[in-house]
Structure formats: structure tokens, C-alpha cells
Image (tube, rainbow, N blue to C red):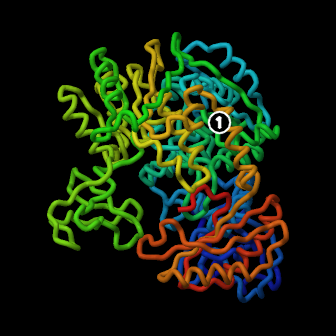
Amino acid sequence: MKRLPTALSTNPKSLPHREISCIRVALDVPLPKLFEYSLPEEVDARVGDRVAVRFGAQQKIGVVIEERIAPELPAERIKAISAVRDDAPRLPEDWIALMRFLSAYYQRPLGETVIGALPPRLRSTKPLPRKVLQHVGEALSARFVPTHALLPDQKKVIERVSSGFNAFLLHGVTGSGKTEVYLHLIAKALECGRQALILVPEISLTPQLEARFREAFPDARLALMHSGLEDIARTGAWLAAARGEAGIVLGTRLAVLAPMPKLALIVVDEEHDASFKQQEGLRYSARDAAVYRAKLAGCPVVLGTATPSLETWHNWTLGRYERLELPERASPGARLPTVRTVDIRDDPPEQGFCKKLLLEVEKRLAHREQSLIFINRRGYAPVLACEACGWAAGCERCTARMVLHATDRRLRCHHCGAEAPIPRSCPTCGNVDLKAMGRGTQRVEETLAARFPGARIVRIDRDSARRRAELSRTLEGIRRGEGDILVGTQLLAKGHDFPALTLVGVLNADSALVSTDYRAPERLFAVLAQVSGRAGRRERPGEVLIQTRYPRHPLFAALERHDFAGFAESQLAERRSSGFPPFVFEAALRAEAPKLETAFAFLRSAAASVRAPDEVRVFDPVPHLLTRRAGLERAQLVMQSSSRPALQEFLGSLSEKLFAEAPRQVRWHLDVDPIEFD
């Protein structure tokens, strides 16, 4: 860190009259502006440098956004910077451009965007530890150890993805070898001494991909980036990417914000996944940011999935993206599984299971094959209830029920994290016979253990796999055959390859079919197609049984045919006629306050404060579906337009007004391109 002489760092008047060299700095403060600071003559601070500055009574880390500017403030009011931080590379111009785009598009202050994109240790004024400051040197190795021979369709894809910016939709069925394609594309980037960025939606997918990458590129340096890392490890990975030392950067959505001076390839695996949308602070879509970043870097971006998001599919139909297809499974003899529905009206479930599904599990046990029971819930049971008076355990801070967790005998709210002990009796009528209503993963595990006492049952959900190392060991054990019946949530639905798994049973598939969320059918199709893809990935055929009350629903018919294209076109036709994205563009203004009326009053005032153009429709404010969370009442208003520029111009004016005039008792944010409305 370059510290400045005390006299120069605190007294800009000591410089020659009117010869103050000024810069504008981005700071993490809730104001949409940059701040002016002066530079002594002997100090060189350029755009992209991190600097320590005095802001009020605090020392803060900022990033220089503009240099050699004409000051707007009088000289006596301009403070000098305290120091230039030289413990990390200067942030490059294309990275600054990306931050400007994200700030403008998602309507957040540039300072919040820039500083929030840095690892926590680089936002601090404290010096970095020595071990992260050590330069390892470049390790962009061209040595590539392929794991499988390429199929003709894979070769076509690899040959088509060339240098220069282009957005490719890699549409490959589950088990078609998309990862093998990624490896060969990465090898091409490394051969040229360049870098590759690979984004995955879940931390649970990184151990398996990390192992594949290290096996394929034994000499290349791989930087792992996700929120589960300790600060030192995350900072070290960020520095390796920013210095150009890491040839491969693998991570979740935050990895798209890492500087990479030699970027030559971006891959977004499972691009349809909702986890790529950040739901706090800067509410950006990592998938969309990746496409824009590839444009800035002049490199290809590959969006890989078996079930493309409807926005991505629509972009392909408009010619904005190029579609590359892998229609067959890669393993010799492997075929897509047979998908069938089980009508629960004809075969009523007992303790959650139809007889037909239990018989199929029994067959797999006899043949030493694995079964997966998929349920989209965690915990022992969703609700603890009293049948005598109808009381149900609810969260005092949220308009939501608490979930019963059997392991530690606690009630938990999955929205705000509140906990409570299990009551001995109903607090309303005193009934001691309280019952768990509903069925979660723990309850399913217990039912299967009672039905198949000799079976090895492995449960994987967010509660049983909190530690990454433990999850990695469990998944590796499953791949080796250490488990007969798997019980899991969406953690098991995507990206995993279990050679012995031949049966998938799906419980509770109907809830999304009656949802008010227009995205619910798209998400249900995606998760069912993904979890179905775990079955039959080798020569033994796979089968999927879906328990449902609506066996003739078109969604299930499309799944049985493995017809994503037909499903997508029908959904897009519905969206077009109903006026939903991707045929309109949306934003939501959300407010939280101690009282619901305060939130409503704020939203009404905000809607009236800026005149909406004719192309923009502003709806009336409504409560959230989950109206109270963590003790605050929540409401929102939605804005739509068929013109993205018109909506963006309106949002810019609205955002400027809100930052200037919003009352302090209300917390608010704008969510551009929202994907959730609860």
C-alpha cells in the first residue's frame, strides 16, 4: 500500500492554487453518486485502482472510476486520498464497464455495485495476509487429458464454437456429455494461454466438476469461487483470476464478477436455474451478466442445459443465440428413461407412497440397482397441527408455517430462521395429540426404512449436507454403489452421475400445476426432466414414476415424450397471449415497513412521483404472498412494458427520485427482471 505524506494527504490547500488533480471514487454508500478526492502530484492513481479515503469519520476503500477530472467542488472542500492500495491488480477497463452496465440496468448505485463485487477482504482497510499476496505465477497449461472419446455430435459443437463473441445455446439431453464438450473448449482456451470461466448454479455441483477439471487439466491452476469459501480462500481465488494466474475459474454466480484479463471462454452450466439470479443487494442475473461480459471480452459464451429457460429459448427463436444440439446420451447403450405417471386416484398413497412405486423399488433392490425418491421439500413435516381445533404452528415474525425438524426436535421457519421448541400441547385447546401434517425428506426416509429394513437409505437435502466435504464424500459413496435408496431434494436433481441408478420416483409433483406463478410450469418441467435424467445413464434402462392426480396434464405428456421443444412452444404461446415475459419486460418495486399501510403509502407515493410514459404500465400495489417476514410487512408494485428502453428510462427516473426522497422507516428495492413474487 502506498501511503501518502501526512501533509499532502490531509491538506489539499497546500498544493499550488487551482492545480489540484482530482479523481472520482466509487464508495459503498447508499447514494447514487461518485465522490471527488484530490491527488498529490507524486501520486499516480488510475481508473481501477483501489484507494483508501476518508468519508465522514470513517476510512473506506473505494475504487477510482474517473481520473483527471475538473473538480466541481471548491478546493478547500476536496479531501485528499489517504493511500493507494497496490496489494491487488488494477481493475481492468472491461470490468469497470461491466460494473457500469450492472449498476445502470439493475438500478443500484455504482459504488455499491463496484465494492460489492469485490471479496470481503478487499473491501476492508486492513492489509491482506501474506499468503494471499504471494504470486504463484502463471499456470495456463495446454496439457489436456481427455476422459472420453468424442462423439460426432460433440465434435460438431466444439468445431462450431470459435473465437470472437457469440452466444450459443448448448441444448443437450441429460447424459449427453455436455461436460466433455466444456473440457475440450477449455483446452482450446488454455492452448492459447487464455482463461476460461465456468459458472454452475449450486455449490453442490462444484466438487464433482472440480474433480473432473483437475483430472483433465492436471497442470492448470484452477480457482474455485463461491460463497461457502472462507474469506482468505475466496480472496486468493479472486487474486489468481485477476492476475491471470488461474487458467480455469469455476464458481457460482459471484464468479461472473471476478476480473479475468485473459478471458477467452464463458460457460454457464444449467443456465435455466433460478439460482443464477441474485435475490439481495444488486439483484443481477449471472446468466445475463455472463452474456454481456462475453460481449465486452469478445469471446464466446456457451449456455448449457437440457431444459433451456424460456427467455433463452425465445432468444434462439429470434436469432440472437445459436442453438447447438446434443440429442443422444453419450454412454454406449444408454437411452433416455421411460417416464410414466401413477394416478393417485386409482392407487391412493399410503404414508406418501403408491403401491406401484414401492413394488418398483423392491425390484431394484432385488437386482442390486439404485432408486431415487425425489421430493421437493425438506424437514420432517411442513406443519405441526392440532386436529381438534385446527391450530397449526406458525412463525410469529412471518406469515408462514414453521417446519418440524425431527433430528433435533425443533420448529424452524424457513423464511426468517426463527426457531422454537415443540409444544407439549396445543396452545389453543390444550390437546396433547399434535400431529405432523405433510411429508418431508426425513419422514420419507423413515417410511422407506420401515418398509425395506435391510436397505441402505441415503438422504441428501440442505439439512443433511450442510458441509461441502461431507456432501462430496456422500456423493462419491453413492457413485461407488454405497446406497440402495436415495432420498433427496433438488440437490440431487441436476449434474450428478450415478451409474447404478435405474429408478426415479417423484412425490408431490402437482403443487406447481395449480400455482399462481406463471413460471411454475416451466420450473416443474425443468426439475422433473433433470431428476428423471439421473436414471439409466449406462446400459441398464431407466424408469421414472411420477405420482400425480393429473396424469393427462400436457406437461406430463411432454415429459413422457422427452419433448422440450413442444412444451416450450406451448408455454411461450400462453405467455404471449397473457402478456408475460419474454414478450414484455418487468420490474418490481418492493417495500418493507413495520406496518403494511406504511409500505402501501410509500408505493402509492412512488408511483405518483414520476409520470410513466404510455409504453409503461404501472400496476396497483399489492401485498406479498408472504406478507410478513422477519417482523416486517411487505408489499410490491409491478411495472411492465413491451419496450425495454422505455422501462429502463422510467426506472432510472423513479430510482433517482426514491434515493433522494424515500422515507427512512421504509426499506425498498427495485428488482429488474424479477423471477419470484413471494
- Left or right of 439 on screen, residue 258: right
Image location (x, y in percent) of residue 458: 29, 34
Task: Tell me: 443 left or right of 431.
Answer: right
Residue sitting at 50 percent across and 60 percent down? 120
- Residue 319, image x, y percentages: 82, 38
Tag 1: amino acid: Phe
Give the side of residue 300 with respect to residue 217, left or right: right
Q: Quadrant of residue 435?
A: bottom left
Residue 173 percent coordinates (x, y): 59, 26
Q: Position of residue 296 (x, y in %)?
A: 77, 47
Q: Is residue 355 visible?
A: yes
73 lies above or below 368? below
Tell which of 416 and 526 is nearer to you.
526
Relative to 262, 531 lies left or right = left
State how many labels appear: 1
Q: Nearer the viewer, residue 217 or 505?
A: 505
At 84% from the left edge and 72% from the top edge, which residue is drawn? 613
In this view, the residue farthest toward the front is 346
* Disc 1 target residue: 567
In this view, 310 is above or below 630: above
Q: Is residue 239 among the parts visible in the rendering?
A: no
| Quadrant in the picture for residue 371 | top left
- Tell me the crowding category of disc 1: few under 14, some 14 to 19, or many 20 or more residues within 10 angstroms, Cα based: some
Q: Secondary structure at mark 1?
A: helix
Q: What is the quadrant of the N terminus in the image? A: bottom right
